Amino acid sequence: MAEGSTNTRVISDAFTTARAQGAAVKDFPGALPASLDEAYDVQDRAISLWPDTVAGWKIGLIQPGYRAQARAERLAGPIFSRQIFTHVSGAVIDMPVFRGGFAAVEAEFVLRLKSGLPDHVPVTAEAAADIVESLHVGVEIASSPFAGINELGPMSVVSDFGNNNGLIVGPAIEGWRDIRPDDLPARVEIDGQIAGEASAAAIPGGPIAALCFLIELCRKRAIELKAGDLISTGAATGVHEAVIGSLSKADFGAYGAISLRLVASTPTQVQLASA
């Protein structure tokens, strides 16, 4: 594992320790990375510390006011295998978030890959679509021990696993290749109130454009996408903050619905890797 700078070690150690303890972080630890490259260095080291397998990636839009500084429109973070849940019809899934931290519910369209894209193949929408096995409805739980994670912008978000703390994978969308993004609806309700309503068209370029971004980013970071990876392509209806105990529902019309309850994260039994 590359040690990285002192600041990289301070940030990654603080966030992974807080996540393992189910605890909050009052202030951003260390100095905020000056660039996305520095933030991804933090994320890479944090991944190496976390005792679980990366089984997918979340993609999020960078707030417009930060895009010039970040020189990017999107960002990404890992989704770990023990934090992926499969939706069961009629069930309410308990999803942990950090007490005193940030917590939000996001309706997502989730790609399951059948392979990575070989490095010699140019990244195009057609090539990206060819490595997709299926498209599913889903819910990402955005949660961080640091309550101000979004307020500090994308360098903060990237530094803490992209603000991800879990993914619920719902039913596959049959015939998705022939369905326009505008015809894939999504609505989020929190405690019975509509928090947001849109479609897959709210994701710039649709889910495949998000995948193209991720392929390019992973090539730059020397990360190999693989068969079975789940790619959460962006918050279709927005990022909806919620509190512990709240009941949420992501409704995708004819394509299914997912119900969940936010619960407080508890200390894990996992042992962080040695720094």
Image (cartoon, grey):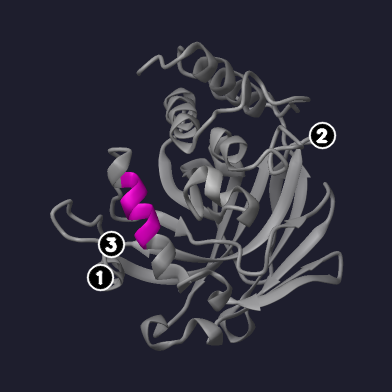
Q: Residue at x 54, y 39 (%)?
A: 158
Find the distance from the CA under tag 1 to the CA under tag 3.
Answer: 9 Å
Q: Is label 1 in a helix, a strand or a loop?
A: helix
The stretch of residues the image draws in magenta is 212-218
Q: Are marks 1 and 3 in contact (CB under 8 Å)?
A: no
Tell whether position 36 is magenta.
Answer: no
- Residue 213, magenta (yes or no): yes
Q: Find numbered disc 3 in the image and state the secondary structure of the residue it sits on.
A: loop
CB under 8 Å between callouts 2 and 1?
no
- For residue 100, the mark is 2
Q: Earlier in the sequence, mark 3 or mark 2?
A: 2
Q: Horizontally, is 264 left or right of 275 in the view?
A: right
Q: What kind of residue is marked 3?
A: Lys
Q: Which mark is residue 114?
A: 3
The residue at which mark 1 appears reads as 130
The location of residue 187, given as percent across then percent down, is: 70, 75
The amino acid type of the residue labelled 2 equals Gly
Q: Nearer the viewer, residue 102 or 99?
A: 102
Which amino acid type is shown beneath numbered disc 1? Asp
